[in-house]
Image (tube, rainbow, N blue to C red):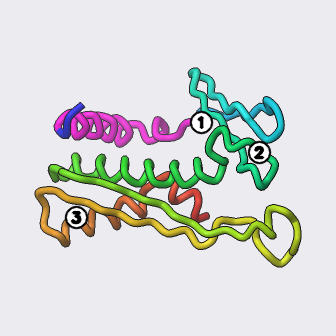
Amino acid sequence: MGNTGVREAIERLSTAIRAEPAKARSKNAPATARLTEGLKFDVTGPNHERVATDMPAPMGGDASAPNPAWFLRAGLASCAATVIAMRAAKLGIALTHVEVTVESDSDLRGVLGLDEKVSAGLNPMRTKVRIGGNGEPQALRALVEWAEAHSPVGCTACM
């Protein structure tokens, strides 16, 4: 679906929700993680979605799949990029390049329980955006800022 198709879909959905705001609320598809062996998990959704997770060898895993924290960063990056593309389509900005990278630092003392004062959280999280398109640099910057404030995954992670 090109830029025009995305814009039309967003406009149709927005019109329907303005007419009936209750249609905006919905339950999200659940994700269920099931242990397969060791630290490997098979994560599934109700529509045959499937991912696998594992931990690196130093933590007792086999490194056979990304670790769960990588999927968090991947979700943040792809959600931000998607919202940027959606907003650009709505505004009529033709994007030539969008690249969102989410990085984080961690301290293993937290997840291993070696120091209760050390958080297991990924902190700090850093998002880097590279973007190009037919808009002025300030318009592209505003587009990224708007998307940051409206990314469902990003907004949830910041709660």
Q: Is tag 3's residue or tag 1's residue first in the polypeptide sequence?
A: 1
Which of pointers 2 and 1 indicates the residue nearer the eye?
A: 2
SS type, badge 2: loop
- Whether the residues at callouts 2 and 3 have beta carbons within 8 Å, the answer is no
The residue pinned by badge 2 equals 61
SS type, badge 1: loop
Which of pointers 3 and 1 indicates the residue nearer the eye?
A: 3
Which of pointers 2 and 3 indicates the residue nearer the eye?
A: 2
| Range covered by the magenta-colored residues | 4-27
| Viewer-side residue, 37 vs 139 | 37
Task: Give me the residue at 57% from left, 66% from top.
Answer: 104
Q: Amino acid at mark 3?
A: Leu
Mark 3 Cα within 10 Å, few/some/many (few <14, many 20+)? Answer: many
C-alpha distance separating marks 2 and 3? 42 Å
Q: The N terminus appears in which quarter of the rendering?
A: top left
Residue 52: % across, % down: 65, 34
Q: Amino acid at mark 2?
A: Gly
Task: Give me the residue at 41% from left, 62% from top.
Answer: 148
Residue 45: % across, % down: 62, 28
Q: The C terminus appears in which quarter of the rendering?
A: bottom right
| Viewer-side residue, 8 vs 17 | 8
Q: Identify the main secondary structure in magenta.
A: helix
Vertical relation: 157 (above or below) 2: below
* Magenta-drawn stretch contains 8: yes
